[in-house]
Image (tube, rainbow, N blue to C red):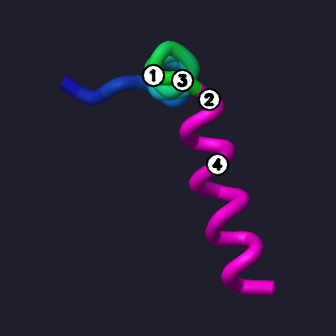
Amino acid sequence: WRARPDVWEQLAASAGLSCQTDFNLHLWQRNR
């Protein structure tokens, strides 16, 4: 079973965007 992109987005949203945002900010600051 392969999830469609929109399904993955909903899964990510339900998992908590704050955690994902913190992770992206961490990578962004490290690569700056």
Identify the secondary structure beneath mark 1. Answer: helix
**Badge 3: how crowded within 10 Å, few (<14), some, or many (20+)?**
few
Q: Do labels 2 and 3 touch, CB within 8 Å?
A: yes
Identified at 55% across, 38% down, the residue is: 19
Question: Which residue is more in the foreground, 16 or 7?
Answer: 16
Which residue is label 4 attached to? Answer: 22
Indicate whether residue 23 is drawn in magenta.
yes
Residue at the limit of the structure toward the left, as seen here: 1
Residue 10: x and y in percent read: 53, 16
Image quarter of the N terminus = top left
Residue at the limit of the structure toward the right, as seen here: 32
* Residue 14 placement, left or right of 17: left
Q: CA distance from mark 2 to mark 4?
A: 9 Å
Which residue is label 3 attached to? Answer: 16
Q: Do labels 2 and 4 touch, CB within 8 Å?
A: no
| Label number found at residue 31 | none
Q: CA distance from mark 1 to mark 2?
A: 7 Å
Q: CA distance from mark 1 to mark 4?
A: 13 Å
Q: Which residues are magenta?
A: 17-32
Which residue is label 2 attached to? Answer: 17
Residue 4: x and y in percent read: 44, 25
Which residue is label 1 attached to? Answer: 15
Identify the secondary structure beneath mark 2. Answer: helix
Residue 3: x and y in percent read: 35, 25
Q: CA distance from mark 1 to mark 3?
A: 4 Å
